Image (spheres, rainbow, N blue to C red):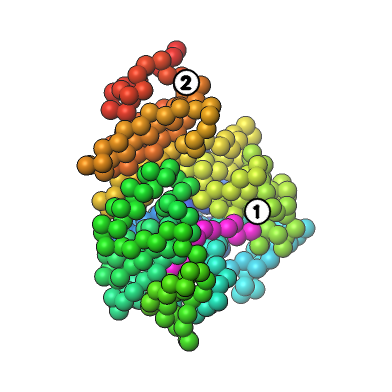
Amino acid sequence: MSGKPTQRHAARRRLVVVGNGMAPGRVLERLLEAAPDAWDITIFNAESRVNYDRIMLSPVLAGEKTFDQIVIHGDSWYERHGITLHKGTTVTAIDRAAKTVTAARGHTVRYDQLLIATGSLPIIIPVPGHTLAGVLSYRDLDDVHAMLLAAQSRGKAVVIGGGLLGLEAAAGLRERGMDVTVLHLLPTLMERQLDPEAGMLLQRTIEARGIKVITQANTKAILGEKKVEAVELADGTRLPADLVIMAVGIRPNAGLGRTAGLDVGRGIKVDAAMQTSDPDIFAVGECVEVAGDVFGLVAPLYEMAHVIAARLSGDTATTFQRKALATRLKVSGIDLFSAGDFVAGSDRDDAVLRDPARRVYKRLVFKDGRLIGAVLFGDTGDGARIFSIIQSGGTFVGSREALMFGFAPAMAA
């Protein structure tokens, strides 16, 4: 346990937080800035660690960073703010009538407001052999440690999934000396973030690093007696493997909310104030469903955190607003950026720059005179500026090509 509970003040209310990831960490940062003396705070964290930057797991895997370098809130931070942190402690029940949470060790705590931040669970393809030793997901530091241990053999790794996490895992394992193959079900990589042309450029760049990529690959089975020995595809191909990484997606970890009787769809349902169907319970992060949507990127999770901190500080006006999202691949030496809506359609038009010699590709998507989406590969220096224009929703009156080459755009007043 970290943090020393302060002596309870009569005016203080009890805030209990289930989960200690980046989203609830941001809630507490904002709350302590706005109302530092309003709450007695207790956190239950299933992981036996302090809060760390999960976005930086890939650099840890690749050997570019250590765990200490990605810690967001160390033990001293909790102590300084009088926060009680229970590490390695899973909450098993919420009693909404009594307003208590109970942990696996039988510890029960009362709350005035509860914040559920249970995150997400990796999707595991239920093919034969998926429970064999050597089959791992890629979600937390324990997964990274297991991968690093397996990589010591410098054997063969198969990564199932050619999205952000899968490619980052593949690059990290390759840096550690493993022979890596990426399997992707669809024709091009990162199809949710890239258009097909950028996806093909990415594949060539990944392959140039010594990573084999097989697209339209349907995994039939993982083979082995007690541990992984090979992966078999639907077309009969067998790929020798000492390690298999499942990186095909995530789903909200909404089980605790469901057993507590909260409204749950794909995730724990919340309104624009981030309140669940119980007004004394908020939810934040990847476990949440807002207006039918679930989120895995950090920007909307931080927006949720801002809303909750405002509400807990007495601001009843702040609400969650869905905004355009941007994505970058966190692999050293690969410049890739996508933002907004770049799906082709008859109601939109493109400005495209192709430079095959430099492996540079830029595509800007416009609708009704507004920039609504962008895909940049090989040269992403203007990514932040382009993203700000997408977010602004302004109308173009100048040269689209000028924007492509880095000149300031002309915008309607």
Could you tell whether 205 is left or right of 167 in the image? left
Does the magenta-highlighted stretch encompass residue 250?
yes
Tag 2: Cα neighbours inside 10 Å, few (<14), some, or many (≥20)? some
Q: Residue furthest right?
A: 97
Residue 195: name its quadrant. Answer: top left
Of badges 1 and 2, nearer the viewer stands 2
Quadrant hosting residue 142:
bottom left
Q: Is residue 130 magenta?
A: no
Please identify the residue farthest to the top as the structure is shown: 413
Image location of residue 407, percent across then percent down: 29, 23
Magenta region: which residues? 245-254
Q: Disc 1 to disc 2, how far (Cα)?
A: 35 Å
Label 1: state its secondary structure. loop
Quarter the C terminus occupies: top left
**Residue 96 drawn above or below residue 389:** below
Outermost residue toward the bottom? Answer: 225
Element on which disc 2 rests: loop
Tell me the number on the disc at residue 26. Answer: none
Q: Is residue 50 visible?
A: no
Badge 1 crowding class, 10 Å Cα cut-off, few under 14, some 14 to 19, many 20 or more, is: some
Residue to which mark 2 is pinned: 369
- For image coordinates 62% across by 32% down, the residue present is 317
Q: Residue furthest left?
A: 357
Does residue 295 appear anywhere in the picture? yes
Q: Residue at x 61, y 45 (%)?
A: 293
Q: Is residue 85 above or below residue 398?
A: below
Residue 37 on image: x %, y %: 54, 46
Instruction: Indicate the position of residue 103 as horizontal and vertical percent values.
Output: 62, 69
Q: Which mark is residue 266?
A: 1
